[in-house]
Image (cartoon, rainbow, N blue to C red):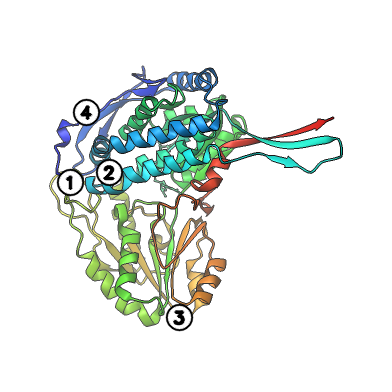
Amino acid sequence: MSDFDPEKITFSSGNYINGEYISAPGDSLGVKRPSDGQLYAEIHQADAQTVDAAVTLAEAARIDSGWSTCSPRERGAALFRWADLIDGDSEYLAKLEAVGSTRPITDVINHEVPFTAAAIRFYAECADKYSGDVLPTRKNSLGMLINEPYGVIGAITPWNFPLSMASWKCGPALAAGNAVVLKPSELTPFSTARLAELAVRAGIPAGVLNVVQGSGQTTGNALVTHPLIRKVSFTGSTVTGAAIMSQAALHGTKPVTLELGGKSPQLVFDDAGDIDEVADRIFQGFTANAGQACVSGTRLIVQRGIAAALTEKLIALCQQPQPGMTWQASSRYSPLIDQRQGEKVASIVAASVAQGAEILAGGQRFEHPGDGWFWQPTLLAKVACDNVAVQQEIFGPVLTIQVFDDEHEAIALARHDVFGLCAGVHTLNLPRAMRLINALDAGTVWVNRYRRTHDFIIPTGGFQGSGMGKDLGRQAFEASMRQKSVLIDF
Ligand code: NAD
């Protein structure tokens, strides 16, 4: 992949409903490029009427096309074809993503697009691998548990990984026989709509996967509260997740899956092994996508014996990233999504310093042509547990550093009152790793690594304010179906 000109890419502004782009009568919303802050396109916001059309058509499509009732193997085959088309469309999808999101083109081509296709293949494989259950009941009767799709699932995704987040929602929901109406973030709308176009080309019936565009308040709210939406699957912030849960409770008591924010600790013990490798893991863990990842490992909790040496290595690593437009092949470091996010990062860093934090690296916006916000990798030391940078999800490349002497202290520092998404444990002592796995309040614990793999069998999901339910794994597929109990007397 070489550099490309973002001005030459075309975008479809409409809502992708029933197999075609439809412009909605509501407002238009401008969309800006994160790399340089330029307005480059607009979307037609779907109001309640347009959302109603999308959901009603989705319900009709799943029944009339036989998507919900066809053999699971046929559904799986359609999903395999879809994944192949995604791989085949890699270049265009990657350009849409690189213009409109925070992901540099090389990263999208090498990771995001293959990751998206692979997640859909995982659920294509699941489609015909699940059975219900035969239950041990009285003599002369047969008890069964039958899995069936919910109907239409409303999915809402954030801006930080638009393609893969869409695949995590649509893969299991479609494989289980549901229809989906998906609302991507209004900040990164286009690549998701392209995925839906490719789904129709792959033979998934028109109307089974629809994409509506717009803000959370207007489009998202209309989707969550629509009576034909039987389940909501949401990824985003903890505050929005709580609002969605209460709306879903008021409008049909519908089930929700919530993948929310995090403030994840990385615990490094003196016996963590090769210090360069460990430093690299910690660094990637808080700077990938400029820290705009739910799983970002933004709290370093390090044992005293290794603290100074590790900090020195991290300071050196923080000098390396250089900002670059996301459409340049050499770019590796992401911008923040927009000015609002930039100002949020700046204000939390300033407040943290006002509370006593010492900046060991970064702490500022990079100077860079255009109005993009590239934030320097930032290390904050001398932070107490109540420091704002330890407490709040910053969603920027900012790492706090806290030092401990023993395992108990490490566990106490790792605890967070709100979040419980992920934790990293870096030690070569297996019994210690096992003790930590048991002690940490986190939906995922990584030991001697800090990143996801293509092992989609491993589900992801948070404890406490980081969410409920799982994306990925068999669990996301199972959660896309409702269980019907049957008792037959004979
Ligand atoms: P956000 O909560 O602001 O928005 C997420 C989505 O919800 C967007 O599409 C938005 O338009 C929509 N929305 C907002 N208000 C809504 C409402 N009242 N009703 C319905 N929809 C509404 O989050 P964001 O800023 O887009 O994304 C960043 C957040 O997402 C971070 O907190 C991050 O940790 C979290 N996240 C979590 C995971 C995970 O798997 N746990 C993955 C990625 C991102």
Residue behind mark 3: 405
Residue contact at pointers 2 and 3, CB within 8 angstroms:
no
Q: Is residue 432 left or right of residue 354?
A: right
Residue contact at pointers 3 and 4, CB within 8 angstroms:
no
Residue depicted at 53% across the width and 17% down the height: 64
Labels 2 and 1: the sequence-earlier one: 1
Residue behind mark 4: 10
Residue type highlighted by circle 4: Thr
Residue 351 appearing in the image: no
Labels 2 and 4: the sequence-earlier one: 4
Residue 333 rendering spot, x and y as whole percentages: 23, 53
Task: Note whether 33 is above or below 374 in the view shown.
Answer: above
Write down the quadrant of residue 247 in the picture. top right
The quadrant of the rendered image in which ligand 1 is seen is: top left
Q: Is residue 15 left or right of residue 376?
A: right
Looking at the rendered structure, the secondary structure element under dot 3 is loop
Task: Note whether 80 is above or below 346 in the view shown.
Answer: above
Cα separation between marks 2 and 3: 40 Å
Labels 3 and 4: the sequence-earlier one: 4
Residue behind mark 1: 325
Question: In the image, which is nearer the foreground, mark 2 or mark 4?
Answer: 4
Mark 2 CB within 8 Å of ligand 1: no
Q: Which mark is residue 338?
A: 2
Cα separation between marks 1 and 4: 18 Å
Question: In the picture, which quadrant includes the N terminus?
Answer: top left
Looking at the rendered structure, the secondary structure element under dot 2 is loop
